[in-house]
Amino acid sequence: MPSEETLPQALKTARALAGDLGAVVSEFGAEEHDEAVALVSHVPQVVSSLVASRLQGTPLHALSLAGNGLRDVTRIAASDPTLWVQILGANADKVVEILHGVREDLNRLIGTLENPTAPGARLDLAQLISEGNAGQSRIPGKHGGPPQAYSWLTVLVDDTPGQIAKLLTEIGEIGVNLEDLRLDHSSGQNVGMVEISVLPNKHEMLIEALNDRGWRVLQ
């Protein structure tokens, strides 16, 4: 957010530079900005790092069971520690406010799981998960638009060069637009798994078309 001391030409230049770089300009006050990035960037980094730290010393045969869930949660834990020391230190007060709330939720969850058969325990667990559902559903969708539910399917591909490119080319030929894509490998097998997200009304049509072309599709 420009201050009273911001020169109009300086603001115009900054906006033009952002536009030339393909960025979308958003204006926030300093306090509002720090609160926002603490929630959507800084705390996720901390939580990801804390989860990933539990993996230290874990036997490799246990880690071999990991799927995309663990990879998704811990992906940003590979970030540069030096950079994050600076970021967290500069915005510590806002991060701490949110972490207090996270701690309250963790204490609540721990208390419930210490006696999971107690009256109301299952309801409390369901409520905690549902609260996560509600929060996740508010994350903006593609191109910053409103959240939208997509359908997922998994295509098995040989773990050889060119297979994924071939799959994506054929999906384009079928006329379906991909909304998201994730890659994984089948444990112990020389097979890759391509998880594809599409609009729900394209889901069944894409499965049928891929099957007709000889791809192995899992739902």
Image (spheres, grey):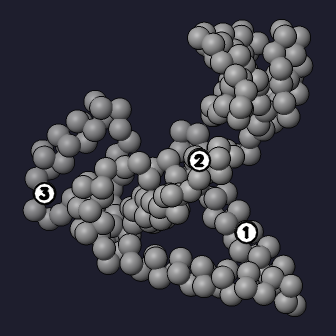
Please state the horizontal and vertical placement of residue 215, each as a whole percent of the image: 81, 15
Which residue is pictured at 78% across the width and 32% down the height? 153
Which residue is pictured at 14% across the width and 65% down the height? 4
Of marks 2 and 1, the one in the foreground? 2
**Which residue is tagged 1?**
129
**CA separation, marks 3 and 1?**
45 Å
Element type where label 3 sits in the image: loop
**Which residue is tagged 3?**
6
Q: Quadrant of residue 170?
A: top right
Q: Which of 203/165 is in front?
A: 165
Query: Disc 3, disc 1: CB below 8 Å?
Result: no
**CA separation, marks 2 and 3?**
55 Å
Which one is earlier in the sequence, the residue at label 3 or at label 1? Answer: 3
Disc 2 residue crowd, few under 14, some 14–19, many 20+, Cα 10 Å: few
Of marks 3 and 1, the one in the foreground? 1
Q: Which of 76/97 is in front?
A: 76
Element type where label 2 sits in the image: helix
